[in-house]
Image (spheres, rainbow, N blue to C red):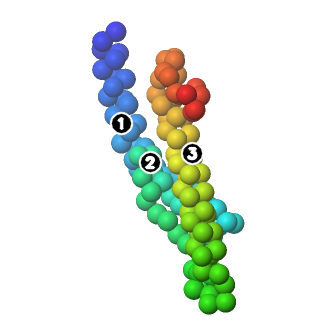
Amino acid sequence: MLGNADQIKERMEQVQAELAKKTVEADAGAGAVRVTVNGKFEVVNLTLDPSMLAALTDETADAADNQALLEDLIAAAVNEAMRRAQEMVRQEMMSLAPGLNLPGLTDPNA
């Protein structure tokens, strides 16, 4: 039994290293904001569509409204990317130990 535990631990470390290299992407505002997150839940890239930046500097537009919109879009994109990263990690961990009933793997909200 302990040998099996050591194998699972070793494999888990391998999976974590692999997950650090994998990424997921999410966007908000029809692509105005795009975020990439890795399997370690780190934001590795955030891209703003040039038209979004132009709207922020448009002197005829309300700067406060544009700033609030951009902030909301960034938050939405980051949250969705994190959700996708959690699902990716959950899937990898389930494949690692399909016979184990580990808490949090069957229900991502557990």
Q: Residues within 10 Å of mark 2 (few under 14, many from 20)?
A: some
- Asked whether disc 2 touches disc 3, contact meaning CB atoms under 8 Å apart, the reply is no
Task: Name the amino acid type tagged 2.
Answer: Phe
Q: Position of residue 25 (x, y in %)?
A: 56, 56
The residue that appears at 50% across and 58% down in the rendered structure is: 36
In the rendered structure, find residue 35 and report the number of the disc placed on it. none
The residue that appears at 40% across and 36% down in the rendered structure is: 15
Quarter-wise, where is residue 74 in the image?
A: bottom right
Q: Secondary structure at mark 3?
A: helix
**Upstream in sequence: badge 1 or badge 3:** 1
**Residue beneath disc 3:** 83
Task: Name the amino acid type tagged 1.
Answer: Gln
**Residue beneath disc 2:** 41
The C terminus appears in which quarter of the rendering? top right
Question: How many numbered markers are drawn?
Answer: 3
Which residue sits furthest bottom? 59
**Residue beneath disc 1:** 14
Q: Position of residue 92 (x, y in %)?
A: 50, 35
Q: Secondary structure at mark 1?
A: helix
Depth check, front residue: 90 or 71: 71
**Upstream in sequence: badge 2 or badge 3:** 2
